[in-house]
Image (spheres, grey):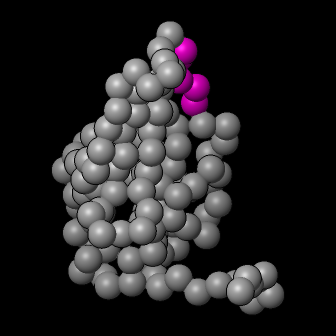
Amino acid sequence: MRFYRDGLGLELLSHFKDHDGFDGIMLGRHGDPYHFEFTKKHGHAVGRAPSQDNLTIFYIPDTGEWMAAVERMREAGFLPVPSFNPFWDRSGKTFEDPDGYRTVLQNAAWRPASGAARTG
């Protein structure tokens, strides 16, 4: 939880204990329409990420805000790792959580790739 709470600055929104044999926490930011939910089944070991290219990307276009986010990760004890895909190292920093899942803090605005499918 330190990676997401202390490093990424997400807040503990809710949690539950022993719901059909599972415990869980929800981390995010109050008022945002999304959150991360982490669950653990009693008696079941947590596995590692299937690859180094399983990514969550946070696009942070403001350079000062991006630098503060990178520094917060470092202060929480998480150092950048080389990205599996070198594209992410050009304008971002990649960090790995204790289970091997990776998060990229990208100093750019998100724009859909040309030719990307759109819905709606």
6 sits left or right of 15 in the view = left
Q: Position of residue 23 (x, y in %)?
A: 41, 27
Q: Residue at x 47, y 33 (%)?
A: 39
> Can see residue 70?
yes
Q: Quadrant of residue 49?
A: top right
Q: Residue at x 28, y 55 (%)?
A: 10
Most foreground residue, 52 or 39: 39
Report the span colored magenta: 44-48
Quarter in which the C terminus is drawn: bottom right
Quarter in which the N terminus is drawn: top left
Would you place residue 90 above or below residue 86 in this image?
A: below
User: What secondary structure predominates along the stretch shown in magenta?
Assistant: loop
Would you place residue 3 above or below residue 92 in this image?
A: above
Would you place residue 48 above or below residue 3 in this image?
A: above
Q: Residue furthest left?
A: 75
Q: Position of residue 26 (x, y in %)?
A: 37, 46
> Can see residue 8?
no
Q: Residue at x 80, y 87 (%)?
A: 115
Most foreground residue, 120 or 89: 120
> In the rendered structure, does residue 95 fall within the stretch colored magenta?
no
Q: Quadrant of residue 67?
A: bottom left
25 sits left or right of 120 in the view = left
Q: Residue at x 61, y 70 (%)?
A: 87
Query: Total number of numbered labels?
Result: 0
Would you place residue 105 above or below residue 45 in this image?
A: below
Q: Position of residue 88 (x, y in %)?
A: 55, 67
> In the rendered structure, does residue 45 fall within the stretch colored magenta?
yes
Q: Residue furthest front?
A: 20
Most foreground residue, 84 or 105: 105
